[in-house]
Amino acid sequence: MPKIGKTVADIARLLAAELQGVRELRAQRKALQKELHALASEIASLKGGRIGAAPKAGRRGKVGRKGKRGRPPGRRRGGKSLRALVEEILTDAGKPMRAKEIAAKLSESGYKTASGNLGNIVSATLAQGKNFKRVRRGLYALKK
């Protein structure tokens, strides 16, 4: 019978060499993993981050009362809250006003908001505010 190729002994030697190569690569991988862990620990100690984790995506705004996001309650860029500005407008008017009238005065004074309907926000502020009283439907004045 003619020889087809390699003998069983030849194949066993090739297999042993392949297994030795796999062992060497595993050892090399283990050494690299240790080195990577050491680098991650060093980075974490410098940045105050977690080991092996990507930085967390930040939340927009701070969490205020009742878990709501955005600015702390009652604060605006100019330092006055919407409630305080509505009180000023009602004081200056000296008479009861509607929410739409107050919203118009706020817009004239340069009050900025991202809301599409400032009248609704003013109406809610008037309804919830402790310093405001409802004179009749849609009309609000300051409590004395």
Image (cartoon, grey):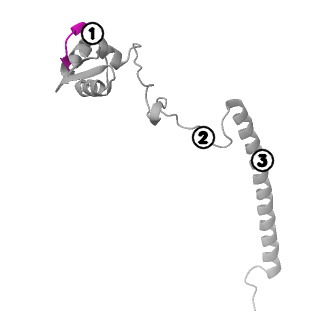
**Residue 61 at what x, y percent from top left?**
47, 29
Reading the chain from its start, which is encountered first: label 3 or label 2?
A: 3
Q: Nearer the viewer, mark 1 or mark 2?
A: 1
> CA–CA distance between discs 1 and 3?
71 Å
Q: Secondary structure at mark 1?
A: helix
Image vertical order of residue 20 relative to residue 88, above or below: below
The three-letter amino acid code for the residue at tag 1 is: Thr
Residue drawn where x is 39% and y is 18% of the image: 76
Which corner quadrant of the image does residue 82 belong to? top left
At label 3, counting other C-alpha atoms closer than 10 Å, the crowd grade (few under 14, some 14-19, many 20 or more) is few
**Residue 87 at what x, y percent from top left?**
30, 14
Residue 97 lies within the magenta run: yes
Which corner quadrant of the image does residue 45 belong to? top right
The residue where tag 1 is placed is 91
> CA–CA distance between discs 3 and 2?
19 Å
**Residue 22 at what x, y percent from top left?**
76, 62
The three-letter amino acid code for the residue at tag 3 is: Lys
The quarter of the image holding the N terminus is bottom right
Residue drawn where x is 66% and y is 43% of the image: 52
The quarter of the image holding the C terminus is top left
The three-letter amino acid code for the residue at tag 2 is: Ala
- Can the viewer see residue 99? yes
Residue extending furthest toward the left: 137
Q: Secondary structure at mark 3?
A: helix
What is the span of residues highlighted in magenta in the rendered image?
A: 91-98
The residue where tag 3 is placed is 34
Image vertical order of residue 98 relative to residue 40, above or below: above
Q: CB atoms at circles 1 and 3 under 8 Å apart?
A: no
Nearest to the observer: residue 91 or residue 68: 91
The residue where tag 2 is placed is 54
At label 1, counting other C-alpha atoms closer than 10 Å, the crowd grade (few under 14, some 14-19, many 20 or more) is few
**Residue 8 at what x, y percent from top left?**
80, 81
